[in-house]
Image (spheres, helix red, strand yellow):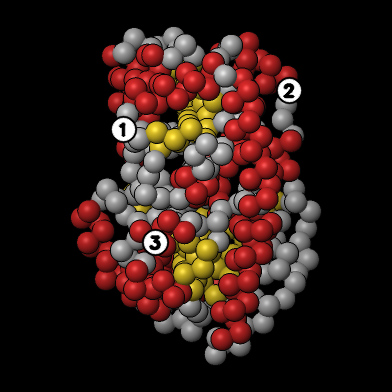
Amino acid sequence: MKVLQLGKFYPPFFGGMETHLQLLATHLQASVDVHVAVAADPSPPGLDTEGSVRIRRMRTYGVVAATPICPELFRVIRDVQPDLVHIHHPHPLAMLAYLTSRTPAPSVVSYHSDIVRQRALRHLIAPILTRTLARSAAILVASPQLIAESEVLRPFRHKCHLVPYGLDTSAWSQVDVATVAQLRRRYGPRIVLAVGRLAHYKGLDYLIRAIREVDATLLIAGVGALRQPLEHVIAQEGLGARVHLLGSVPDVRPYYEACDVFVLPSTTPNEAFGIVQLEAMAAGKPVVNTALASGVTFACPPNVAALTVAPRDSAALAGAITRLLADPELRSRLGEAGRTRVAQEFQASLMSERTLGVYRAVAATSSAGIVLHAQRSPGAGARRRTR
């Protein structure tokens, strides 16, 4: 089976959905012929091969409403001639390209989140999204909360399959101890960590203000449009010595290992899951998250692996962080429970098996007569590039 994955971006672009797409493609490559088409940012346009995954990085003519403008999308389906198209929503241009392609290939849609903040965009793409979901053979959703809460998904619940995100936990046991020790010497003894794009819904301004009341250093790893406004908040609060915007971090694992508490302070259901919570849990770290009508607390449940507070509440964030920093036994209990939960429920192998099961079901009912086949793949480190 030849599967074309249509996403916005791909690593080294920094983001949870990009990490998810790469991990899914990597784990599927032993069973299907995986092609990926994404915007060329920050990498230049061209073709990559990672293992047997073929990545087409398309020239980008700007980004509008968080959507990369890639005209090449409208011929990529014709060029690849896939047996199945897997669209990662939100990605209106990819949906439009599929609808206008006249391909006989069925589609699967990963519905990562509702569009919450960009109301104009939501109304503009509603007809395209509705037609895409109606035509899709299956819809993959990462949490039961999103299936239950999304008004967009309500007419299509019969097509929804619960496929939680996964993590390759084996990678989290391979941490450079010297780097961890260096980070603790530089930023310790109490380190609070946040990881993610510098975007409005991440709630990082509330977290920065919370640090006024916490005896700790805050590290924020990630890039995005809000860097300058966040720098202003840091200066305004006089926290330049205790809050550090790290930018893009090539390997974030030592930072998880070095921290005492991980915080996901998101403010809206745009945060549909919080994959970074899985990373913190895999590292055995306790989490402070927020009570959103999304999969955030499904991934990391209150009083199991996290302390959960109301969104947009700096005082509550400060209280939860301080409580964890003051109670090593509580930190250990939540951290170990989180590690166990990831190992049992959120393995990347389990995510890929569930996805493959959906592909099989689609193939079995498709008039295209798709054949699923195993294929050999080069070693994990293999990578080629052509232009």
From the viewer's side, name the closer residue of 153 and 108. Answer: 153
Which residue: 50% across, 49% down? 298
Query: Where in the figure is residue 8, as x and y percent of width and height?
Result: 44, 54
- For the image shown, how many numbered marks are present on the structure? 3
Question: Could you say where residue 253 lies in the image, as x and y percent from the top left?
Answer: 63, 32
Of pointers 1 and 3, the one earlier in the residue sequence: 3
Q: Position of residue 172 (x, y in %)?
A: 69, 37
Residue 366 visible to the viewer: yes
Q: Is residue 133 left or right of residue 119?
A: right
Residue for point 75% across, 69% down: 375
Kindly indicate whether the residue at mark 3 contacts the one at mark 1 (C-beta within 8 angstroms).
no
Q: Nearer the viewer, residue 178 or 47?
A: 178
Taking depth in this image into account, of 285 and 122 the one nearest to the observer is 285
Determine which residue is flagged by label 2.
Answer: 177
Nearer to us: label 1 or label 2: 1
Where 155 sits versus 29, above or below?
below
Q: Amino acid at mark 1?
A: Arg
Q: Foreground mark, 3 or 2?
A: 3
Indicate the quadrant containing the C terminus: top left, top right, bottom left or bottom right. bottom right
Q: Let me know if residue 283 appears in the view.
A: no
Name the disc covering residue 148, or none.
3
In the image, is residue 79 above or below residue 16? Answer: below
